Image (cartoon, rainbow, N blue to C red):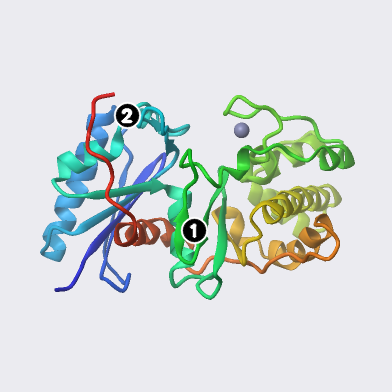
Amino acid sequence: MTRIIHGIDVGGTKIELVSHDEDLRPLHRRRIDTPTQGIQAFIEAVAGLVQEADDRVGVAAAIGVGIPGFVDPRTGCHVSANIPALRGQRVPPMLQARLKRPVQVANDCHCFALSEAHGGAAARFDSMFGLVIGTGAAGGYCVNGRLLKGSNGALGETGHTPISAAVLQRHGLPLFDCACGQRGCLERYVSGSGLQAIYTHLSGEQRDGQAIMALADAGDATARQALAVHVDVLASSLASLVLHLDPGAIVLGGGLSQLGHLYEQLPDQVTRHLVRGMVAPPILPPAFGDAGGTRGAAVLALSLLPVEEARPC
Ligand SMILES: [Zn+2]
């Protein structure tokens, strides 16, 4: 019997469902706005998407869901910075009860890594780290195609490790505050808003990422310096990642993964930050781009164990 999987990618503004066949080929796609009225509205919105997709593919399909944040292992409750409706809720059992079938749920950046490890850019490597650099900076680590989630379920929250003091000093950068409550988190320097903050620090002017790229292309010295500082901070953070996990490959995702200069400059720059005798692993663009979230959620539904039964928070 043909297996069909709905991969659902939950974002701060949009929820996307893509139905896949067992070879992860997309069959049906639908995207809606993320409800802002609370957890019940969220559950009902997902249920509506699933019902429509079930009708389209003619079967009650398996379901995998990628969601920002992670589950607190002490309470089973969701910790999410950018979807307030999910905060403190036991999302997987609630979805499972409403959808009347097992539902596999993981962090959205973990799903990105799973997708690139399964038939993606890192398919030929035994281990890989997928790092999503967009509005934030977080990733997932896969070994032999299996996602390692860590004891907090938060392995790969690279964006909330501190910037190196040496890099901070070299560029005269300030310690930026982070929404997580810490100061100097890498996310505040290597994400899209991080690049803008570096540019503003150097120039005193506000520009979005596209404007900074256009200025750099036109030869603007400050924009070029901002990009160079950004690459140096990112290289330093990837070197730290390599020293901890030594993955066979690193795949970049998110909006900044489209910046071609990263793939030209990062390998040498990461190597420069490593212990002598070590070299950076291949640093690769994603094979599936924006489709990685829903595709990875589909992989999740094939490969992970069932979630726990519902208990009240
Ligand atoms: Zn932080």
Residue 113, given in percent of the width and then of the height, sits at 49, 58
Label located before the other in sequence (1 or 2): 2
Report the side of 47 relative to 108 (left or right).
Answer: left
Q: Which mark is residue 89?
A: 2
Residue 129, given in percent of the width and then of the height, sits at 57, 58
Residue 78, given in percent of the width and then of the height, sits at 38, 32
Give the structural element (helix, strand or loop) at label 2.
loop
- Residue at 27 percent across and 40 percent down: it is 308
Position of residue 279 relative to residue 113, above or below, is below
Position of residue 130 relative to residue 287, above or below, is above
Report the side of 231 relative to 301 (left or right).
Answer: right
Q: Which mark is residue 113?
A: 1
The amino acid type of the residue labelled 1 equals Ala
Position of residue 15 relative to residue 272, above or below, is above
Give the structural element (helix, strand or loop) at label 1.
helix
Which of the pair 308/219 is nearer the observer?
308
Residue 38, given in percent of the width and then of the height, sits at 29, 27
